[in-house]
Structures are given as structure tokens and as C-alpha cells.
Image (cartoon, rainbow, N blue to C red):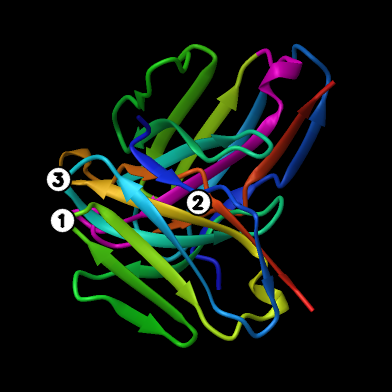
């Protein structure tokens, strides 16, 4: 089983719609969680950190469920520019700063 | 603005050439930097952890004699792909940051696209 798993998609989303997807992690000792966005042939860019109580940044909402070991990302009012691959990233307690990446979920927003 | 700079962005060279990639932290000191490799349609795979002033820690399956890492200062780590072959063609990305306990996000360089002919 992979340490961090994501549905690869693609999620085809009409412009203006809401899309949500999850990421599961296997290490129960994981401490820090992040969503990164990666555009084609570019480096990952931080979208948002994920906090235990859940957090929102504009149209993006992230939640953490420690009991079931998953995090989620919800995008409201999707824009064409939201088309990208969303990477779930986890930092385990014993791993120091070493990050583990999910395979990414591809989102395609269409007019 | 960018906090981690990577150079060069794109390299095309002949098989057998050695290629050096630089990763710099621009406005902070990084005792640890990370090198990743990403093949098309795959996720980032950690290759090694670069430690300032000491040897790098390589992930399982990564040849340390093939991928030489030097972290001689608090703002610069270099990855040298020695005697590169076509199968080494990939997207190489470095990162730095993360805070002392790894609870802060890391920042990534722009990446280096390496093509070996």
C-alpha cells in the first residue's frame, strides 16, 4: 500500500461548479499535511497547509480526518485556471522534514 | 517572489556527460535541502536529503555515486548527475524549508528538465 494515495482523476469539472477529492495516508504518526498544486511541466506550488480544525482560503477548503486518516480538498466556483494536478503531501513525525507525495489528482475545469 | 532558485531550467546533452544542477535558498539558510525526480505522469520521488556540511542521505534505490550531492554552504546544494544516460532524463526538483520540525511547507525550485540524447 502506498503511503499517500490519491484518486488520479481526471475530474472533469464545469466552470463554476464545486469539486472535492480526498487523499488517504497510511502513517498514523503523520503530523503535517499540505496541498500543493502542480501545473504541467512546472514545479509544485503550495496551495495551502491543512490544519486539524480544517481551514479555508478563498474558494479552497481543506479538512483533516485523523481517525480515518484522510485529508480533503474542496474547490468552489471552479475557474478555468484551477485546472492542474493537486498533490497531497504528508510529513511523518519521524521523518523530520522529509515529505511524502501522493500521486496527484488531476482536475480539468471546462467552460 | 521565489525563495528557492534552481539552475539551469533546461539541459540537453549527450550521453556520458555529467550535469550539475544548483539549488539556492534565496532569503533563508537551509541546513537541509531535498532533491526529487519526477518522470512524466508520475509523482515526485525523493532521491536524497542534502545536509549542509555532511554527507547526503540517499533513498533506497538511488545510486549515490551516480547522483553526487554537495551542500557546502547554508544556501547552496548541488546535484551532479554523473555520466548521464537517456534513462536519467527526467524533471529534477529541489526543495528547502519546512521549519525545524517539518511542520511548515517547503518551497520548491523551478525544476530542471534534463534530456539526455
Instruction: Kindly state the secondary structure of the residue where label 3 is placed.
Output: loop
Residue at position x 71%, y 50% in the image: A41
Q: Is residue A87 visible?
A: yes
- Residue A23 falls inside the magenta stretch: no
Residue at position x 55%, y 73% in the image: B1
The reply to whether dot 1 and dot 3 touch (C-beta < 8 Å) is no
Tell me where the magenta segment starts and ends, as one range: B83-105
The disc, 1 or 3, on the residue closer to the chain's N-terminal end is 3
The answer as to whether the residues below labels 1 and 2 share one chain is no
Residue bearing mark 3: A29
Q: Quadrant of the C terminus of chain A?
A: bottom right
Instruction: Kindly state the secondary structure of the residue where label 1 is placed.
Output: loop
Q: Is residue B85 left or right of residue B93?
A: right
Q: Quadrant of the N terminus of chain A?
A: top left
Q: Which mark is residue A67?
A: 1
The answer as to whether the residues below labels 1 and 3 share one chain is yes
**C-alpha separation, residue under disc 1 versus residue under disc 3:** 12 Å
Chain ID at mark 1: A
Q: Is residue A95 left or right of residue B18?
A: left
The reply to whether dot 1 and dot 2 touch (C-beta < 8 Å) is no
Quarter of the view holding residue A16? bottom right
Q: Nearer the viewer, mark 1 or mark 3?
A: 1
Residue bearing mark 2: B24
Amino acid at each position: 500500500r502506498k503511503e499517500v494515495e490519491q484518486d488520479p482523476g481526471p475530474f472533469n469539472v464545469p466552470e463554476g461548479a464545486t469539486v472535492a477529492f480526498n487523499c488517504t495516508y497510511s502513517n498514523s504518526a503523520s503530523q503535517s499535511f499540505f496541498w500543493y498544486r502542480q501545473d504541467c511541466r512546472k514545479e509544485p506550488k503550495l496551495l495551502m497547509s491543512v490544519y486539524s480544525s480544517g481551514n479555508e482560503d478563498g474558494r479552497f477548503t481543506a479538512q483533516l480526518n485523523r481517525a480515518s486518516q484522510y485529508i480533503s480538498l474542496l474547490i468552489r466556483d471552479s475557474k478555468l485556471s484551477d485546472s492542474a494536478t493537486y498533490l497531497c503531501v504528508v510529513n511523518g513525525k519521524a521523518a523530520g522534514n522529509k515529505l511524502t507525495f501522493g500521486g496527484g489528482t488531476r482536475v480539468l475545469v471546462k467552460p | 517572489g521565489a525563495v528557492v532558485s534552481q539552475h539551469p531550467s533546461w539541459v540537453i546533452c549527450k550521453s556520458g556527460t555529467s550535469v550539475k544542477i544548483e539549488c539556492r535558498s534565496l532569503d533563508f539558510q537551509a541546513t537541509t535541502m531535498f532533491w526529487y525526480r519526477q518522470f512524466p505522469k508520475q509523482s515526485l520521488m525523493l532521491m536524497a536529503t542534502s545536509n549542509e556540511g555532511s554527507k547526503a542521505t540517499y533513498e533506497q534505490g538511488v545510486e549515490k555515486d551516480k547522483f553526487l550531492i554537495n551542500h557546502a554552504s547554508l544556501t547552496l546544494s548541488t546535484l551532479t548527475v554523473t555520466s548521464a544516460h537517456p534513462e536519467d532524463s527526467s524533471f529534477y526538483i529541489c526543495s528547502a524549508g519546512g521549519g525545524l520540525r517539518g511542520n511548515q511547507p517547503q518551497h520548491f525550485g523551478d525544476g530542471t528538465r534534463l534530456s539526455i540524447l
